[in-house]
């Protein structure tokens, strides 16, 4: 129970990797704030956590809007107490050739995947527990380190998140806030349905050094370590959870 009683807010946690981390952290005692643009999905995850004996609260809203993220963080702090950690998981995934990227798609992706990191960090600074070491965990991706065709918008955003993580580690470290990032590799989730077929995942597994795709639990366990006191001297790190994709190319 490494996170007993610790309020931790997770953006985009209504499904996929965010849902997996929410369930895992709750099983280790965290009071989890599950936020998603689809509030019904967030409520479903919270229901599952509570059914398993955990503590969680659901919030809906577009966290790419500054005031919305601030309001969600304020509500969570009121419900659960001063916040100990923020996980910036929300993103929009679109794979397409560079000439097909539209203003609408790019704005939607930047709003969810990059603007929300800024707004979440600002809100967290206001409502964090100032009497304890706190943590922010951002989501990058192996595409930030290995160029893949048709991922221009997604790669640009995840590269920006990687750079911002390093800046924040240096800027917020003196305030007792550790800032790290994870780079999950090929992990089948509902969020990737329609972008990656089962056949493509099978082919990906053949090219991963560990010869398998990842699972949400692989990501959740690694994220929990980074957030835990066991990693209290880890700041500004990028942890690849990818079976060796970045290392091997």
Image (cartoon, grey):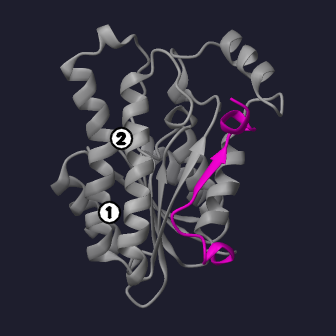
Instruction: Estimate the spatial distance between the alpha carbons at disc 1 and disc 2, rounded to whole Å.
Output: 13 Å
The residue under label 1 is 121
Tell me if 186 is positioned left or right of 13 in this view.
right
* Residue 109 % position (x, y): 31, 32
Pointers 1 and 2 in contact (CB under 8 A)?
no
Position of the C terminus by quadrant: top right
The residue pinned by badge 2 equals 113
Residue stretch in magenta: 229-249
State whether residue 53 appears in this view.
Answer: no
Q: Residues within 10 Å of mark 2 (few under 14, many from 20)?
A: many
Residue that appears at 45% across and 15% down: 150
Question: How far across and down, in percent of the image, does residue 127 sit?
Answer: 30, 76
- Relative to 36, 214 lies left or right: right
Give the vertical position of 194 relative to 212 (above or below): above
Where is residue 50 shown, x and y percent of the image?
Answer: 57, 60
- Nearest the eye: 7 or 185: 185
Corner quadrant of residue 142 = top right
Mark 1 neighbour density, 10 Å: few (under 14) some (14–19) many (20 or more): some
Is residue 214 in view from this perspective? Answer: yes
Question: Does the segment drawn in magenta span residue 91?
Answer: no
Q: Nearer the viewer, residue 12 or 248?
A: 248
- Residue sitting at 49 percent across and 47 percent down? 139
Q: Residue at x 56, y 60 (%)?
A: 237
Tell me the element at label 2. helix
Relative to 111, is 167 above or below?
A: below
**In the rendering, at what x and y percent does residue 97 appear?**
39, 10
Element on which disc 1 rests: helix
In the figure, 9 relative to 1: above or below? above
**The furthest residue to the bottom:** 131
Q: Nearer the viewer, residue 106 or 24?
A: 106
Residue at x 51%, y 39% (from the top left corner): 15
């Amino acid at each position: 129970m490494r996170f007993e009683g610790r309020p931790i807010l997770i953006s985009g946690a209504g499904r996929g990797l965010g849902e997996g981390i929410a369930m895992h952290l709750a099983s280790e005692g965290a009071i989890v704030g599950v936020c998603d643009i689809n509030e019904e999905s967030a409520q479903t995850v919270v229901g599952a956590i509570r059914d398993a004996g955990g503590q969680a609260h659901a919030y809906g809203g577009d966290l790419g809007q500054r005031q919305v993220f601030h309001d969600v963080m304020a509500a969570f702090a009121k419900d659960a107490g001063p916040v100990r950690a923020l996980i910036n998981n929300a993103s929009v995934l679109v794979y397409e050739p560079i000439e097909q990227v539209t203003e609408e798609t790019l704005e939607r992706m930047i709003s969810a995947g990059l603007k929300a990191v800024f707004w979440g960090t600002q809100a967290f600074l206001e409502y964090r527990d100032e009497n304890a070491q706190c943590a922010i965990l951002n989501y990058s991706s192996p595409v930030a380190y290995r160029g893949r065709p048709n991922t221009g918008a997604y790669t640009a955003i995840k590269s920006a998140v990687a750079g911002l993580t390093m800046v924040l580690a240096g800027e917020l470290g003196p305030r007792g806030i550790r800032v790290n990032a994870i780079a999950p590799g090929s992990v089948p989730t509902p969020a990737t349905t329609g972008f990656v077929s089962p056949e493509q995942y099978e082919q990906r597994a053949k090219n991963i050094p560990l010869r398998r795709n990842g699972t949400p639990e692989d990501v959740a366990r690694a994220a929990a370590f980074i957030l835990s006191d066991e990693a209290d001297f880890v700041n500004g790190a990028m942890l690849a959870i990818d079976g060796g994709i970045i290392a091997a190319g």
